[in-house]
Image (cartoon, rainbow, N blue to C red):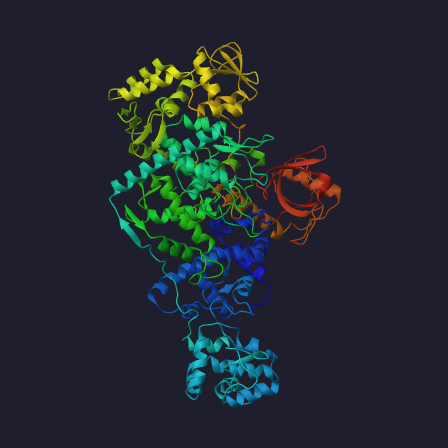
């Protein structure tokens, strides 16, 4: 067992690490930074807390986890050679083991030299639960199980095993353990075992190590119990001691060791041009689909459910309008929401509608519009794949509703794309092999799912990522496209280095006035921030990019995609069957007019529009004259305008507006008495309760819009008119929400710190550690100051690690002397909440009851009230 204070032992090792190693630790375990530890002892203590250790263990890859599990069942401390024996002698394992130990050491889960490797006590307790055995399948050691056995029973076990009797239970257990750890004597003992007993041991060897026995066990089980090869843990329960299992396993902690990550299995290989063209085409479709969705919701805004989210019927209606499946409709809706193009309007009758950002997005080129969608998708924690399922309380999960956030989603998406990027260009991977690789990189908490069980959450996220990447055009035929590759931030990029305006840690110090800069005597405080190791400053594979990295990557991806997208065309091909074919994406003005004049019949590389009486009437309602429609088609068609289309426009135009509907309830006006008589005689108009008001006017108690719609259903072509008799132009009002910000991602734990924060945190921890451990100047005998000397305050001796406490006058004198002598002092400080702390400061001025100083602990200039300073003391010369 570990002796002494493990946190203090770890603290001593952390104290000997360079600043780059501390930065690596804080980068790998960002939860240790909240708040910044006061010193290295506090950092070591926090690194050993249960919540932090659980999080650190869960973020290890499978082989590193297996290494930690082996250390948990190894003797403490454990020599490296013993650990290597537990992990096996395969070449891959031997090559990977040093890296796994180094990673555990970097994350402060292991410390000590190669002959005394120690696992953090909390990690040991987590990885060797007494009730269910270790993840290795091993049970507790014999000494832990045999503690409760009676001395007489222990002596009987020794006798049956051929061991000499001992004088106490402790030595008896030690003798039994020595037997189990001696391969030769164990081989001799098991040679005498009945075959059935050997079979029982074989079933328990690889776990679980627990079994049950009856009150009268068979002879072969009794043989095992009599020799301690099975030890009782409770009435009817037995356990295979760890030492026996290790002998049966030939000293291996695991049945199989995953030292090498599984490689993705190719699902197909295509030419790079084919993949890029396919993905680019889908990217264009993605932009058009989002535009169509928001154009639809601008005029027919769906309501927000009382509990939040989109109703199922509205999702179905949207899927039908977009000609996609409901899961795909949920993806497009959530994508627009995550990009900030869609939100609720916040009105009393709350509805979803496009935001003002949608109009700005529409003005961008197609490649940049796609890049914004792709960047929003990569960073979003909302998971459309959950729509239609249920949460932990059994409540249905709806699109745009609560409960869809999964903090691991951005990390999984990036990991999947980076995995695809590592394959040869044009190669697609199977979903199962991608999921297997991600399970190796981050093993699920409950282990591998059994056959028929639901996949773990990260596996489902990986499968959804592959589907969504294909829909969005990041991949083509399952292979990562060139613009999808450009969308990924560099795996070795540090966030602040990519941002041109990111401040360097040293620049913040150099910007201080000369009197507030760190003093020369404090180690490393007067030097620029040390360069961070690549593993500290770089984001690990699969880690989400910073906003600056994501922005730069999106611009790169847009530049790569732009040449792949077909240029917008300014013409269509009119057909004799009242259709028009757009041979590519239309220019915005042409698409807007054609979208009113015709109905979209099919989408794809070439969009097919169909002209109908209703669509032509819609264009006339929007204020277009028949002559304008003829001119528009003639100007934008590469083929002659077919005669049937001209006839259709003229025929609809002749009927359009002959009937005029205004507000009475509603009136119907027409110069053709015969047409009014025809309407009155039509049985379908009975519900409208029309009656003659004048020879050319009918009135109805129904609303004008109802009358207009009903007559159009009857086959007439009425037009609405204003009180002055002018035809009202019918244009659907485009609804917009007030300015809205995109939904903030819900992080999976604290965000990874950048290099600037890491450097500042390391400096603060170092300064706090110096404040806790620095030797102080001993008191000096008072001397008569010379005329040319500045009087110095009397000095007091204080125990390192405790708060200095000096009288107010002495405290003031020490601070004033530090200002004049350009020295650093150690103070005790109590904040407004009553929390006491110790700090190393370099005073700049003392006046008005406050001291202004550069605080080495916080790495900034601060002002402290004098009445909150408990005491002050100068640092010894060797510390300053």
User: Which residue is located at x 59 percent, y 86 percent?
Assistant: 153
Residue 327, percent from left and from top? 43, 44
Compare residues 89 and 137 and report the one nearer the observer. 137
Residue 358, percent from left and from top? 46, 29
Quadrant the N terminus occupies: bottom right
* Residue 12 visible from this viewpoint: yes
Residue 868 image-quadrant placement: top right
Can you say whether 365 is above or below 90 in the image?
Answer: above
Total marks drawn? 0
Can you say whether 758 is above or below 103 in the image?
Answer: above
Compare residues 821 and 661 and report the one nearer the observer. 661
Residue 255, percent from left and from top? 41, 69
* Residue 487 visible from this viewpoint: no
Residue 740, percent from left and from top? 53, 31
Can you say whether 679 is above or below 257 in the image?
Answer: above
């Amino acid at each position: 067992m570990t002796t002494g204070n493990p946190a203090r032992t770890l603290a001593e090792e952390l104290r000997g690490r360079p600043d780059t190693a501390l930065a690596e630790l804080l980068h790998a375990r960002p939860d240790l930074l909240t708040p910044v530890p006061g010193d290295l002892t506090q950092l070591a203590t926090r690194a050993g807390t249960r919540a932090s250790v659980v999080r650190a263990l869960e973020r290890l890859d499978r082989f590193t986890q297996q290494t930690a599990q082996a250390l948990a069942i190894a003797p403490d401390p454990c020599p490296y050679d013993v650990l290597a024996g537990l992990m096996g002698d395969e070449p891959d394992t031997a090559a990977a083991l040093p890296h796994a130990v180094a990673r555990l050491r970097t994350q402060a889960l292991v410390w000590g030299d190669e002959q005394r490797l120690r696992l953090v006590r909390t990690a040991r307790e987590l990885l060797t639960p007494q009730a269910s055995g270790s993840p290795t399948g091993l049970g507790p050691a014999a000494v832990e199980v045999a503690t409760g056995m009676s001395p007489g029973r222990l002596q009987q076990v020794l006798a049956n095993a051929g061991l000499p009797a001992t004088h106490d239970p402790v030595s008896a257990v030690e003798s039994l353990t020595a037997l189990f750890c001696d391969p030769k004597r164990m081989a001799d003992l098991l040679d005498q075992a009945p075959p059935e007993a050997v079979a029982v041991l074989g079933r328990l060897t690889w776990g679980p190590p627990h079994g049950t026995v009856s009150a009268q066990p068979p002879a072969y089980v009794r043989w095992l119990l009599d020799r301690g090869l099975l030890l009782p843990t409770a009435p009817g329960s037995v356990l295979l001691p760890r030492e026996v299992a290790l002998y049966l396993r030939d000293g291996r902690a695991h049945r199989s060791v995953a030292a090498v990550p599984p490689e993705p299995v190719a699902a197909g290989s295509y030419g790079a041009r084919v993949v890029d063209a396919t993905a680019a085409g889908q990217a264009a479709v993605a932009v058009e689909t989002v535009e169509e969705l928001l154009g639809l919701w601008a005029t027919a805004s769906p309501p927000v459910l009382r509990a939040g989210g989109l109703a199922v019927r509205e999702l179905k209606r949207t899927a039908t309008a977009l000609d996609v499946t409901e899961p795909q409709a949920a993806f497009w809706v959530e994508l627009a929401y995550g990009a900030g193009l869609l939100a609720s309007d916040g009105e009393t009758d709350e509805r979803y509608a496009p935001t003002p950002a949608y109009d700005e997005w529409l003005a961008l080129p197609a490649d940049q519009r796609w890049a914004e969608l792709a960047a929003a998708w990569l960073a979003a924690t909302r998971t459309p794949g959950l729509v239609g399922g249920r949460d932990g309380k059994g409540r249905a999960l709806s699109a745009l509703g609560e409960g869809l956030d999964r903090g691991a989603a951005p990390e999984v998406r990036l990991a999947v794309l980076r995995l695809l990027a590592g394959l040869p260009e044009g190669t697609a991977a199977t979903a199962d092999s991608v999921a297997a690789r991600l399970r190796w990189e981050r093993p699920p908490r409950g282990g591998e799912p059994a056959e028929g069980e639901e996949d773990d959450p990260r596996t489902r996220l990986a499968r959804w990522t592959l589907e969504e990447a294909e829909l969005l055009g990041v991949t083509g035929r399952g292979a990562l496209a060139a613009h999808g590759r450009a969308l990924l931030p560099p795996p070795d990029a540090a966030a602040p280095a990519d941002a041109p305006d990111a401040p360097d840690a040293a620049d913040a110090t150099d910007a201080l006035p000369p009197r507030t800069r760190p003093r020369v005597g404090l180690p490393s405080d007067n030097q620029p921030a040390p360069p961070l190791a690549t593993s500290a400053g770089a984001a690990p594979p699969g880690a989400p990019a910073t906003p600056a990295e994501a922005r730069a990557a999106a611009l790169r991806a847009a530049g790569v995609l732009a040449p792949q997208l077909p240029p917008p065309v300014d013409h269509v091909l009119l057909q004799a069957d009242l259709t028009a074919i757009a041979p590519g994406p239309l220019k915005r003005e042409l698409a807007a007019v054609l979208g009113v004049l015709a109905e979209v019949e099919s989408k794809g590389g070439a969009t097919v529009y169909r002209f109908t009486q209703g669509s032509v009437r819609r264009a006339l309602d929007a204020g277009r004259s028949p002559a304008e429609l003829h001119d528009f088609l003639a100007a934008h068609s590469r083929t002659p305008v077919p005669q049937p289309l001209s006839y259709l426009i003229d025929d609809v135009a002749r009927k359009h507006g002959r009937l005029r509907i205004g507000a009475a309830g509603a009136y119907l006006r027409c110069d053709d008495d015969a047409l009014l008589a025809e309407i009155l005689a039509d049985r379908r108009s009975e519900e409208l309760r029309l009656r003659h008001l004048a020879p050319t006017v009918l009135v109805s108690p129904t609303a004008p819009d109802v009358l207009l719609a009903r007559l159009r259903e009857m086959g007439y072509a009425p037009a609405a008119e204003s009180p002055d008799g002018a035809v009202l132009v019918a244009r659907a009002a485009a609804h917009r929400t007030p300015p809205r910000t995109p939904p903030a991602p819900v992080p999976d734990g604290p965000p990874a710190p950048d290099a600037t924060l890491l450097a500042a945190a390391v400096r603060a921890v170092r300064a706090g550690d110096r404040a806790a451990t620095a030797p102080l100047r001993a008191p000096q005998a008072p001397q008569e100051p010379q005329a040319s000397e500045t009087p110095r305050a009397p000095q007091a001796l204080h125990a390192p690690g405790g708060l200095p406490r000096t009288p107010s006058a002495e405290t003031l004198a020490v601070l004033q002397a530090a200002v004049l002598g350009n020295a650093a002092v150690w103070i005790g400080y109590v904040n407004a909440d009553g929390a006491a702390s110790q700090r190393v400061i370099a005073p700049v001025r003392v006046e008005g009851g406050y001291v202004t100083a550069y605080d080495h602990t916080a790495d900034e200039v601060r002002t402290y009230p004098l009445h909150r300073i408990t005491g002050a003391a100068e640092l010894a010369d060797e510390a300053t």
